[in-house]
Amino acid sequence: VSAPSTDPVTEAERLARVALSCAVEPGDGTTSSLIRQIGAVATFRQSLVPKPDSGLAQRLDEVEPERQLEQAARCGIRFVVPGDAEWPPGVDDLDHALADGGFGGTPPGLWVKGPRSLTELATSVAVVGSRTASVYGVEMTRALCGHLASARVPVVSGGARGIDFEAHDATLRADGVTVAVLACGVDRVYPAQNRDLLRHLAAEFVVVSEQPPGSAPTRPRFLARNRLIAALTRGTVLVEAALRSGALNTAGWAEQLSRQVMCVPGPVTSYTSKGVNNWLRQGRGTVVTHGSEVLELVGESGEHLVVEPRGEVRPRDSLTRTEQQVLEWVPVSSPAAVDSIARLCLVHIRETEGALRRLEGKGFVRLGDGGWRLAPDV
Amino acid sequence: VSAPSTDPVTEAERLARVALSCAVEPGDGTTSSLIRQIGAVATFRQSLVPKPDSGLAQRLDEVEPERQLEQAARCGIRFVVPGDAEWPPGVDDLDHALADGGFGGTPPGLWVKGPRSLTELATSVAVVGSRTASVYGVEMTRALCGHLASARVPVVSGGARGIDFEAHDATLRADGVTVAVLACGVDRVYPAQNRDLLRHLAAEFVVVSEQPPGSAPTRPRFLARNRLIAALTRGTVLVEAALRSGALNTAGWAEQLSRQVMCVPGPVTSYTSKGVNNWLRQGRGTVVTHGSEVLELVGESGEHLVVEPRGEVRPRDSLTRTEQQVLEWVPVSSPAAVDSIARLCLVHIRETEGALRRLEGKGFVRLGDGGWRLAPDV
């Protein structure tokens, strides 16, 4: 898929990045910025010098990068690095996104399994949310992803239970492109109940991780994975999230990376909408209620304009100007005489009477004892 | 209730305002700005000159202001004008708030029925919404108004069916102060099914209108009434509103008057939340999910600070720092040996093992074939 003929990445660079990818924990901002400053090869060499309180030198020494690459290739896994045609440029934005304690940074490379290219993610959107999704969350996720799929916008998510699963699944069922970013190696399946989904994505689409094959998922790796989801996409849709949901972490990365943060509001009384509503309350996201609104926010300028929702057209809208003017001043409760209505609406009394008769025919007003009044429910 | 002894309003001024109040339709911005520029007496005199396309001179000529005031007083209705101690200063902000076609402006005076003073509204909040409220909307309205009542914040609404009714009723049941602003005369009851409520408010609290007694409600009068609700309060809470709901009109006035616009988000799939969610989408309001958040927004600086919602405390939060550090690196799926965990978490292997044992006792991790892994659901 990538274009090795024009590949500017040297063999030494690629192997240094493999070694660093295997030995450095994801989210190690110090190593990331060293790579940026002095390059991967020099970073590798410098990191081979043992330091107190760090097992990095020892771990680096144990890695056999050529063997890692070969083993991965045998499993259909490639290692994509900056400079490769397939490298997603958005990931470089992570150079400047660090969380507390220096956590973050651009990974040395990405382990990728599957026939599609990461270049397809240039227009993608992340759809994330709680693992314990409500019926409302499932419904909204499926509707949004169905719409994104029909617009050929790839959907990125984390392959987890709940909203993540629904996002991948709904996109697949709408013939869309969807990619899972994992906290474990791309050859592993986590969670087990999503085995079929993850196998299918790896076989037909793409599964991505900054962890080398074989790695187990741990909490810090989930947090590091979230930053990749944000960096790979144009924006993150937060469908449902409790107050301490990991999906808020992804939204936080999207915010830090100046990506769109899009929030699906939910009932204040729903546990799984509390995190989303709170995010909106803090002014940290834009409300989205439909896939078209997501497209408008992540598309090119003017690409996906949304028609402002206007409510249904009412029978009243089709009246003439005079009829509307007269109707405005017909009382809703006790009746009024023609002359009193005419005086208020500044229309001649004969015209007013004519308009009232037509309005009566259309069911808007009624003539009773004491004059004209609105028909019920007008 | 007002303080006539220090009343700077002359008899001529008051009578001119009565006449203008009876003859000019609400929301007549031209007359309002004339009153502001040359005073009510001069405006009255100038308006007595007949003009083409305007019945104002004739209507003014027909008004008998002394008789109007006497009749009103016999029904327990007073006429409050700028300069009276009871005049709510916020209403003057309407001088500078005009909608399309010059609709708006400060009314010549307010017709008031009930024993409470309008001065109490200085700290009030408007709670408005659809006439066709959902169970969710009713529930949210009652919870919010109950909280406002317990904080002694008066609740202003429009006396209509649905959210308005619930707002008044819930405030009353929580021993709070609530005021209805009507589109018809304060001696009238509209809608009929709210008769008991409106009678009670007029007897025990206050009912307000810029319409003279006896006036029928018309559509333009409802729109004019909405601007008064916004002007009388520190902010407007939009609980539920369809896309063309009149409650959005009230929110629009609040926005124009630089009052807080507070929105209760709701399910995207709910008809009666579409208007509110759309308002939030446009960035025109702040999310509120609880009465305390309303108080924070409308109170004096620092008066009602809200504790940021933090989610429930988890068992994990009570672990020691080392235990937390070790726990972070225990794999969620396949097990890992102590030395591999120790290497990742940068804790000495003996300390790591001790922490793992304690974590096992607390149910966080399990030791099985191949090493340690997280317990399910940690």
Image (spheres, coloured by chain):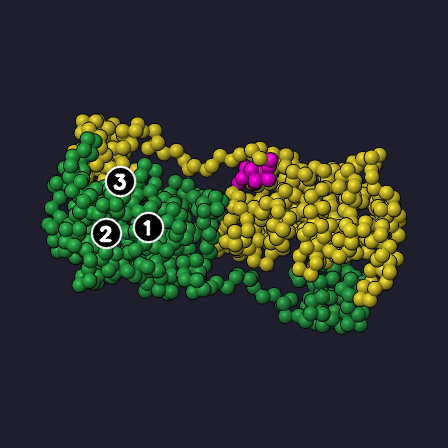
Chain colours: A green, B yellow
Q: Which chain is disc 2 placed on?
A: A
Instruction: Identify the residue under disc 1.
Output: A93
Q: Which residues are magenta?
A: B290-300
Q: Name the quadrant containing residue A142.
A: bottom left
Q: Check disc 2 and report the residue beneath it.
A: A110
Tell which of A375 and A297 is nearer to you: A297
Horizontal and vertical percent position of residue A33: 27, 43
Alpha carbons under labels 1 and 2: distance apart: 15 Å
Mark 1 residue element: helix
Query: Predominant secondary structure in magenta?
Result: helix
Count the marks: how many?
3
Q: Amino acid at mark 2?
A: Leu
Using the rendered image of the protein, determine whether residue A176 is visible from the camera's viewpoint: yes
Judge from the rendering whether residue A374 lies leftward or rightward of residue B294; answer left or right. Answer: right
Q: How far, Cα to Cα, is label 3 from label 2?
A: 18 Å
In terms of depth relative to the viewer, which is nearer, A12 or A295? A12
Label at residue A30: 3
Q: Residue at x 23, y 34 (%)?
A: B345
Image side of residue A70 versus residue A167, left or right:
left
